Image (cartoon, helix red, strand yellow):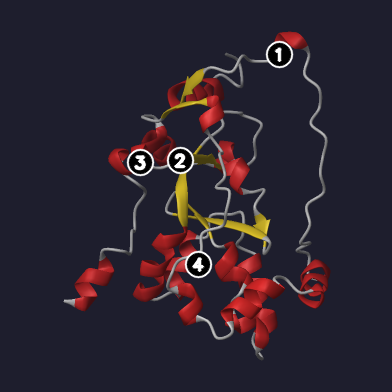
């Protein structure tokens, strides 16, 4: 009975149309920007999760497994880690994961976008029913999710939470190729004729734009 209940949390396929309609949408390229322990998202079965609070308070950071634990989490931030999560986590972890969900995956429609243009046809098909105003996509929550059960699951949680990412761990991760600060790049100015008015753009519009090589 317990196993059956837990199995319902192990979502082994992407969100259906009804589920998609209930959640905010985030593009794959937006998710890729949230790739540090200070602000970390992951994509699992086309659902977007903000695991920042869990990641930065993970008990593995304070024992002999610190290095491997930090790297295992950090290398998956900002990316689709469906295969690894499914392989390494228990049904209980799947149940807990649901409390970190902030939205579902969508695409930006830019054929030059390395993240969104690599989505599969099956993924794009599921997204065709999306219909969102441009200013309704990629609206990050003001606070990172902090489930009620998490403080009781982690020893010295509040101390870890207040401490955040230590300088020592940040230096280690940077040396390993995972810098924990993102350089702020100025967006290139667009000529007036290339600026698009803020209006409702369906995922169908984005997909047509993608198929047309970026032409509207």
Q: Quadrant of the C terminus?
A: top right
For the point 57% across and 56% down, which residue is it?
41
Q: Is residue 40 visible?
A: yes
Residue marked by disc 4? 84
Q: Are there few (<14), some (14-19), or many (20+) residues within 10 Å of tag 3?
A: few
Residue to which mark 1 is pinned? 194
Which residue: 61% across, 21% down?
A: 214
Looking at the rendered structure, the secondary structure element under dot 2 is loop
- Whichever of callouts 1 and 2 sits on the residue coming sooner in the sequence is 2
Residue 109 in the image, given as x and y percentages of width and height:
56, 28
Q: Earlier in the sequence, mark 3 or mark 1?
A: 3
Q: Quadrant of the N terminus?
A: bottom left
Residue at image mark 2:
24
Mark found first going from the N terminus, 3 or 4? 3
Residue at point 79% right, 31% down? Answer: 187
Image marks 3 and 2: residues in contact by CB distance under 8 Å: no
Q: Is residue 34 above or below residue 188?
A: below
**Can you name the residue that lies furthest to the bottom here?**
64
In whole angstroms, how far apart are the C-alphas of marks 3 and 4?
26 Å
The image quarter in which residue 193 lies: top right
Can residue 69 be seen here? The reply is: no
Q: In front: mark 3 or mark 1?
A: 3
Q: Nearer the viewer, mark 1 or mark 2?
A: 2
How far separated are the C-alphas under marks 3 and 2? 7 Å
**Which residue carries the number 3 mark?**
22
Q: Judging from the image, what secondary structure is the residue with disc 3 in?
A: helix
Circle 1 sits in a helix, a strand or a loop, which is it? helix
């Amino acid at each position: 009975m317990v196993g059956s209940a837990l199995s319902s949390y192990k979502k082994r396929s992407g969100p259906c149309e009804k589920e998609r309609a209930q959640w905010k949408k985030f593009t794959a390229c937006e998710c890729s920007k949230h790739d540090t322990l200070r602000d970390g998202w992951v994509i699992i079965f086309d659902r977007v999760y903000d695991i920042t609070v869990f990641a930065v308070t993970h008990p593995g950071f304070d024992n002999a497994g610190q290095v491997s634990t930090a790297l295992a989490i950090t290398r998956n931030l900002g990316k689709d880690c469906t295969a690894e999560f499914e392989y390494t986590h228990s049904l209980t972890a799947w149940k807990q994961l649901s409390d970190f969900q902030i939205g579902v995956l969508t695409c930006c429609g830019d054929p030059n976008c390395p993240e969104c243009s690599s989505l599969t046809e099956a993924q794009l098909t599921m997204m065709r029913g999306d219909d969102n105003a441009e200013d309704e996509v990629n609206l990050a929550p003001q606070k990172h999710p902090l489930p009620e059960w998490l403080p009781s699951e982690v020893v010295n949680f509040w101390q870890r939470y207040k401490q955040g990412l230590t300088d020592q761990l940040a230096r280690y991760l940077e040396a390993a190729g995972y810098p924990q600060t993102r350089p702020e790049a100025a967006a290139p100015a667009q000529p007036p004729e290339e600026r698009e008015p803020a209006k409702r753009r369906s995922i169908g519009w984005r997909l047509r734009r993608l198929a047309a090589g970026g032409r509207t």
